[in-house]
Amino acid sequence: MALKKNLKIAISFLVVAILFFLLFRKLDFELFEKYLAEGNKFLILLGILVYLSSFAVRALRWKVLLSHIGSFKIRGLAPVIVAGYAVNNVLPVRIGEIVRAAIAGKMFRISIPATFASVFVERIFDGLTIALILSATIFFYPFQENMKTLAWGASLFFALLFVFALSAAFSSKPLEFVMFLRSKSPKFLSVFFDFSEKFLKGAASLDSWKKIVAAFSLSLMVWAFELAVYLLISAAFGVKIPFVGCLVMLCAANLGMLAAPTPAGLGVFQGAIVFALETFDVPYEQRMAVALILHAAQIVPTTVIGFIWIWIKNLKIGKITSE
């Protein structure tokens, strides 16, 4: 088991190395360093502060999605979210989402599968919001056909996931179907069905339209904060693109990150930003400067703060991930 886990980690870092090799191979390093040196430090710092502030909104959204399980305080949920992000930044395949649910389950004495279900629903809201923003931008800018196809495809995918979550929240049919499969399946699959049943019960976080509207509104606020970070970092490096350009950057990077197999989406994030800015004729070295600092502004503070909190709470991440 340990060998398999270590192999996955090694492969993910190999992918990072390959992606960065492809990104840096045609870079004019002298010009790149010039762009980095001329970056506005005040705007970069302001971008970091805005990004960290967004975790209060994320915590409020998670509080809404967990309200069917219990009542929680934002100041208690926010550091757990940051800790999950910190783990995501150093381990591949977004394992931080599972760690976040496990930490919350142990700290607040609540069902871990149900808590993970709320994280899953949260990601559906994130993906749906991003996909809808990207779909809206194609009406205001003449993108290439492949970008339009990506926008509509992503919107359809997350719309279907949203419908699935709603069906589990407002109908007992999905749960009844899982229980039916359980009755017809061998006993060694019981652990899988136990988890599935608890997971579907956890989707009850969307048990009212009021809650759905609140979660979606807060998702818009979360991405408004993120967009502000993109605007600030772009301005710090003198990137002159229309407002829709920052929307495209935001959508491209985060849609790529949702399925990124690498820690913190390293390589995937930078590639998405470089690709998005290419549409607006931004010099390659300037694109790379924005991509690297924008990503660093998000992952460095959360990783440091998250692991300091994990250390203070004496949490054993290795034990949690193995469990």
Image (cartoon, rainbow, N blue to C red):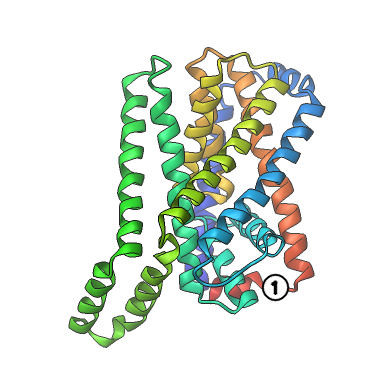
Q: In this picture, is 216 found above or below 102?
A: above
The quadrant holding residue 321 is: bottom right
Q: Residue at x 41, y 66 (%)?
A: 204
Which of these two is toward me, 94 or 5?
94
Q: Is residue 310 left or right of residue 288?
A: right
Residue in the picture at 31% in, 29% down: 149
Q: Position of residue 251 (x, y in %)?
A: 48, 33
Quadrant hosting residue 36: top right
Residue at the image point whose x is 31% and y is 21% from the top: 145
* Residue farthest to the front, as pictured: 210
> Measured along the vertical axis of the image, is residue 72 above or below residue 153?
below
Left or right position of 75 against 65:
right
The local crowd at label 1, few if under 14, some if 14 to 19, many if 20 or more residues have their Cα within 10 Å, is: few
Name the spot of residue 50 as percent of width and height, x first: 71, 38
Percent x, y for residue 177? 22, 72
Residue 22 in view: no
Which residue is the extreme one toward the left? 184
In the picture, measured across the screen, residue 172 lies left or right of residue 243, that is: left
Q: Amino acid at mark 1?
A: Leu
Report the number of discs. 1
In the rendered image, residue 234, in percent from the top left (x then y), is placed at 65, 23
Q: Residue furthest bottom?
A: 187
Asked whether residue 198 appears in the rendered view, the answer is yes
At x 39%, y 71%, the residue is: 201
**Residue 283 falls in image quadrant:** top right
The residue tagged with tag 1: helix, strand or loop? Answer: loop
Q: Nearer the viewer, residue 179 or 73?
A: 73
Q: Which residue is mark 1?
A: 315
